[in-house]
C-alpha cells in the first residue's frame, strides 16, 4: 500500500472503528489527528498509546461534529501540525433507539446533525485543505444501504443520506483528483453495538453472529483496513462507491 507520509483526520477515534483505523494508519506510515468527542467515556490516550506502540505518529484533538467551527479546527490541526492533509474520515456517529411514534422532531434532528450533517462538515473541511490526490471516506451502515431496522428510522435515513452525499461529492471533486467513498459496515463489535439499549448488546451480537455466513460479527480492524484501502493509492480509480463489510450478512 502506498500511503507513507500522508496525514489523516479521523472523527470518533477514541473507540471502535476510528481507534482501529488510527492504528491501521500507524502501521502504514500515515499520521493521524485523532478526533475525540469530549463526552466520550473512552480514553483517547489509549488510541494514542496503540498508535505509538505501532511506531506511528498522531495527535489528539477534541471535536464535536455538530458544529462547523469545531470540525474546521480539526482539519486545520492537521495542516498546522503536519503541514498537509490527505485523508478525511467521517467516522463519528451515534445510535439511538426510537419507535416511530416517539420520533420527535428533536430526536430526528439530533440524529441527522451528527450522522449526516457531521459527515458533510468533515468531508467539506477536509476537501478544503487537500491538494490533488486526497481521499474522503464516510462510514455509513447496512441500515442505510441495504437493510431495514425497526425503531431506527432516523439512523437509517442519516446513513442512507451519507451514500448520496458521497456520490455527489465524488463527482464534484473528481476534477481535483480528490476521491470520495463510503464503507457500509454490517454488525461490528464496538461500544456502539455492545450498547444493549440502543443496539444489540453482547448477547444479541453473539446470537446475530451465528446467522452471519462468516459465523461471527465483525471486528473494528476489519472495517478499518477497508477504509485504509479506500484512501490508499491501491484504490486510486475508485470514487463515489460504497463497500459493504458485513461477513455476508446482507447477501444471505
Ligand atoms: P463507537 O461508539 O466506538 O464510535 C463512535 C464514535 O463517535 C465515538 O468515539 C463517539 O465519541 C463519537 N461521537 C459521537 N458523537 C460525536 C460528536 N457529536 N462529535 C464527534 N464525535 C462523536 O462505535 P463504532 O461502531 O466504532 O462507530 C463508528 C461508526 O461506524 C459510526 O458512524 C457508526 O454508526 C458506524 N457503524 C457501526 C456499526 C457497528 O456495528 N458497530 C455498524 C454500522 C455502522
Image (tube, rainbow, N blue to C red):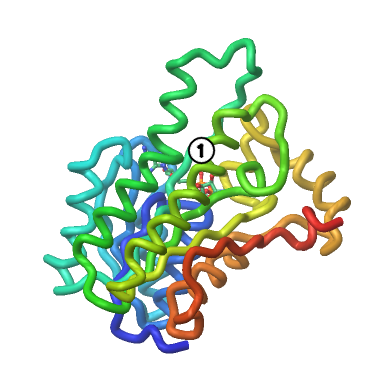
> Residue 235 vs residue 210: left or right?
left
> Residue 235 vs residue 13: left or right?
right
The residue sitting at 57% across, 42% down in the picture is: 192
The residue sitting at 19% across, 73% down in the picture is: 84
Q: Which residue carries the number 1 mark?
A: 158
The residue sitting at 32% across, 68% down in the picture is: 8
Q: Looking at the image, is 225 positioned above or below residue 107? A: below
Q: Is residue 194 visible?
A: yes
The residue sitting at 87% across, 51% down in the picture is: 211
Residue 147, image quadrant: top right
Q: Is residue 57 visible?
A: no
Residue 150, image quadrant: top right
Of residues 62 and 144, which is closer to you in this image? 144
> Residue 47 vs residue 159: left or right?
left
Residue 97, image quadrant: top right
Of residues 172 and 88, which is closer to you in this image? 172
In the displayed orientation, state which residue is furthest to the left. Answer: 80
Q: Looking at the image, is 169 positioned above or below residue 156? A: below
Secondary structure at badge 1 equals helix
Find residue 88 and report its horizontal and vertical position in percent. 34, 62
Find residue 13 and report its horizontal and vertical position in percent. 41, 55
Amino acid at each position: 500500500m502506498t500511503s507513507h507520509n500522508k496525514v489523516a483526520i479521523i472523527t470518533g477515534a477514541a473507540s471502535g472503528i476510528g481507534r482501529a483505523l488510527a492504528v491501521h494508519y500507524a502501521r502504514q506510515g500515515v499520521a493521524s489527528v485523532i478526533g475525540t468527542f469530549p463526552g466520550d467515556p473512552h480514553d483517547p490516550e489509549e488510541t494514542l498509546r496503540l498508535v505509538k506502540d505501532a511506531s506511528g505518529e498522531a495527535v489528539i484533538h477534541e471535536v464535536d461534529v455538530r458544529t462547523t467551527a469545531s470540525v474546521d479546527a480539526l482539519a486545520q490541526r492537521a495542516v498546522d501540525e503536519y503541514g498537509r492533509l490527505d485523508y478525511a474520515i467521517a467516522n463519528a456517529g451515534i445510535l439511538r433507539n426510537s419507535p416511530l411514534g416517539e420520533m420527535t422532531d428533536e430526536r430526528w434532528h439530533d440524529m441527522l446533525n451528527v450522522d449526516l450533517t457531521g459527515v458533510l462538515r468533515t468531508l467539506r473541511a477536509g476537501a478544503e485543505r487537500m491538494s490533488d490526490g486526497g481521499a474522503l471516506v464516510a462510514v455509513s451502515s447496512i441500515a442505510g444501504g441495504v437493510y431495514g431496522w425497526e425503531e431506527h428510522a432516523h439512523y437509517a435515513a442519516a446513513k442512507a443520506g451519507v451514500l448520496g452525499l458521497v456520490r455527489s461529492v465524488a463527482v464534484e471533486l473528481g476534477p481535483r483528483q480528490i476521491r470520495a467513498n463510503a464503507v457500509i459496515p454490517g454488525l461490528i463489535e464496538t461500544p456502539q453495538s455492545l450498547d444493549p439499549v440502543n443496539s444489540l448488546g453482547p448477547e444479541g451480537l453473539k446470537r446475530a453472529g451465528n446467522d452471519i455466513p462468516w459465523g461471527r460479527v465483525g471486528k473494528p480492524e476489519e472495517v478499518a483496513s477497508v477504509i485504509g484501502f479506500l484512501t490508499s493509492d491501491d484504490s486510486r480509480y475508485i470514487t463515489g462507491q460504497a463497500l459493504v463489510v458485513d461477513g455476508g450478512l446482507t447477501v444471505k
